[in-house]
Image (cartoon, helix red, strand yellow):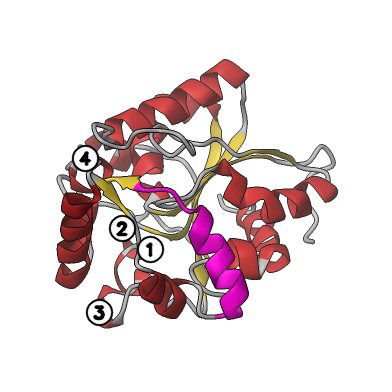
Amino acid sequence: MSETRETGETFVLVTGACHGGWAWRPVANELRAAGHQVYTPTLAGLGEDDDPRDVTLTDCVNSLVDYVERAGLNDVTLVGHSWGGYVLTGAAPRLASRLSRLVFWSAFVPNDGESLIDACPPHYGEMFRAVAAASGNNGVTFPFEVFQQAFMQDADEETQRIVHSVLVPQPLGTFTEKPDTSAFYALDIPTAYVLSEDDISLPGEWHWAERFPQRLKNPLMIETPGSHEALFTRPAELADAFVRACAAR
């Protein structure tokens, strides 16, 4: 684990779609063992028994802001994975005085008015809407074959099935809401972009590296091994990448 200041860093880790704070446990254990403080909120609509029917992206942003403020956290390294980049983008302006840096890990960095469905390949958007329509609760789940082949291809099938079985439906409203990012792009907070080298969840011209780091102001770029689900398959390496991202200025 890379060295940081003597008192350690304060990390708030925001999950991607269909995950709750529990998903960070392997990474959080690595970071805590190295002397850092780690917080792993479960956002609105993503608890095990939550109803995703009417939950919006704004609800998730509000829940993250409330979490950080209620905990009284300061000098925070705020990390967002995948869809969690949308939550960071919305929350960062409201938490700016409490943040030391922003870290996007294989994450969306939305343009103004660009929903997640807008930012995805068209076949993903069609799949999300079809799954939500058939769900009965407006929730989006990833078919196992998609998850296995594109999101967690670096794990054995048993592990893939275990993780897939505990994912929760993602509220469709968090994928369709079009964010106002003007306040985010006016910020002057150091940023880093961490890219998993084996992440194939967004193919070809839609790939993370091709579109999203360039939207940040001079981000520190860090590559780390693993797939889109490296928080399970390569937690030590991912934790180290987050610590290295704390050099962002």
Query: Which residue appears at 57% of the width and 80% of the height?
Result: 154
Q: Judging from the image, what secondary structure is the residue with disc 2 in?
A: helix
Q: At which x and y percent is residue 180?
A: 20, 37
Of labels 1 and 4, earlier in sequence is 4
**Amino acid type at image mark 4:** Pro
Distance, label 1 to label 4, CA atoms, is 18 Å
The numbered disc on residue 205 is 3
Name the residue carrying label 1. Answer: 213
Viewer-proximal residue among 87 and 168: 168
Q: Judging from the image, what secondary structure is the residue with disc 4 in?
A: loop
Specify the segment rendered in magenta. 154-169
Q: Is residue 120 above or below residue 99?
A: below
Name the residue carrying label 4. Answer: 179
Query: Which residue appears at 66% of the width and 69% of the height?
Result: 234
Magenta segment: does it hold 13? Answer: no
**Amino acid type at image mark 3:** Glu
Distance, label 2 to label 1, CA atoms, is 5 Å
Q: Can see residue 228?
A: yes
Query: Which residue appears at 64% of the width and 70% of the height?
Result: 233
Distance, label 2 to label 4, CA atoms, is 15 Å
Q: At which x and y percent is residue 37?
A: 73, 37
Please state the total of marks drawn on the protein image: 4
